[in-house]
Image (cartoon, helix red, strand yellow):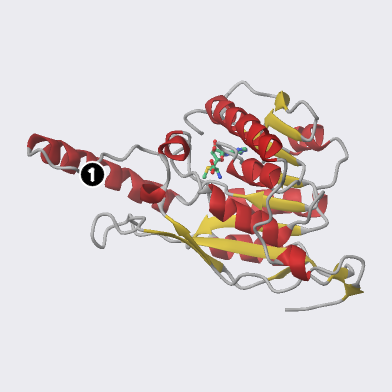
Amino acid sequence: MEETEEVDMVRASRFWESGDGRYELWLADALDPEQVSTVLGGRVPSALVVDAPYSAVTHAGHRSAAVTTRRAADFAASRKGGLRARADLTYAPWSCGDVERFVDLWSPLTHGWLCSLTDHILYPHWASSAGVNDRVVFAPLPFVETGSRVRMVGDGPSSWTCWLSVSRPRGEPWSKWGALRGAYVLPGERYLNSAEKSERIIGGKPVSGMCMIVADYSRRGDLVVDPCCGAGTTLVAARMMGRPAIGLDTCREHLEIAARRIARTHEQVTMLGAEQDWGQSEIFAQPGEKEECEP
Ligand SMILES: C[S@@+](CC[C@H](N)C(=O)[O-])C[C@H]1O[C@@H](n2cnc3c(N)ncnc32)[C@H](O)[C@@H]1O
């Protein structure tokens, strides 16, 4: 059970909506069919972009790394050193069964790409569940934040890596999509400005990374859904690039941050008077031209 979860939450509730109604946040469980149906209300996502919790092994590794760095930071502070302590994850890991339930539930609900960030342990389950749900599964793509410490305690359990799992429905006519990136290499947390750092939750992703994924796997006007949206980075990216979006999360505190970030992004985009284009796919895409293409 997630530590920050609303245990008595039995039905989904709309948490926040943008003034133009194009961006919605819901307090809802992405693994509960009834709640998901309430959230979608018959709407069909064009793309799912999800960064669900990682495995228990990665979470345990993160926890032991947090303890190690806290001790090291205390030591460094006592020596006037500069090491910063690391906060712990506030939500529970997902099991292979959770991944399978998620893909079984969401796969028939979307006609488009299913893009999921995950660790090396859960990746095989994302891929096999997508295959079982009659999806074409592509090779995993590395998602690397430069300078992030993925092996915090030597060879201990904190070693982990992040992969983007990508699949699309088999058998449907598929538009040409153009050349897509084969990896996502991004500046790590230490390179972010302080505003971005302060509103990033533990396990959150950089805006630049989610912008690239949203640009690659959706087009302007497509409905993007992030069923485990955390602090709303996917929706921030979607707002920057003119895709309407819906986010779900079981944690009220995360949704509060997400609402603030999306509203701020809306102001910035409105002030600049232009949505951004982070991707290659829109340049190469040829909407309307259909073809069957297998990997
Ligand atoms: C890795 S974080 C997402 C971080 C997000 N991409 C960001 O950049 O802020 C995973 C999120 O999934 C949420 N979560 C866990 N189980 C969930 C469930 N069953 N339904 C919806 N959200 C869930 C957690 O509360 C957490 O916010």
Q: Is residue 102 positioned above or below 126 on the image?
A: above
In the picture, residue 90 is in which quadrant? top left
* Image location (x, y in percent) of residue 284: 77, 71
* Image location (x, y in percent) of residue 210: 59, 52
**Outermost residue toward the left in this view:** 79
Of residue 164 and residue 60, the one placed in the foreground of this image is: 164
Per the image, the residue denoted by label 1 is 69
In what quadrant does ligand 1 lie?
top right
Of residue 41 and residue 267, the one placed in the foreground of this image is: 267
**Outermost residue toward the front in this view:** 272
Residue shown at 28%/54% (left/top)? 152
**Outermost residue toward the top in this view:** 8
The residue type indicated by label 1 comes to Thr
**Residue 257 appears anywhere in the view:** yes
* Image location (x, y in percent) of residue 234: 63, 45
Label 1: how many Cα within 10 Å (few below 14, some 14–19, many 20+): many
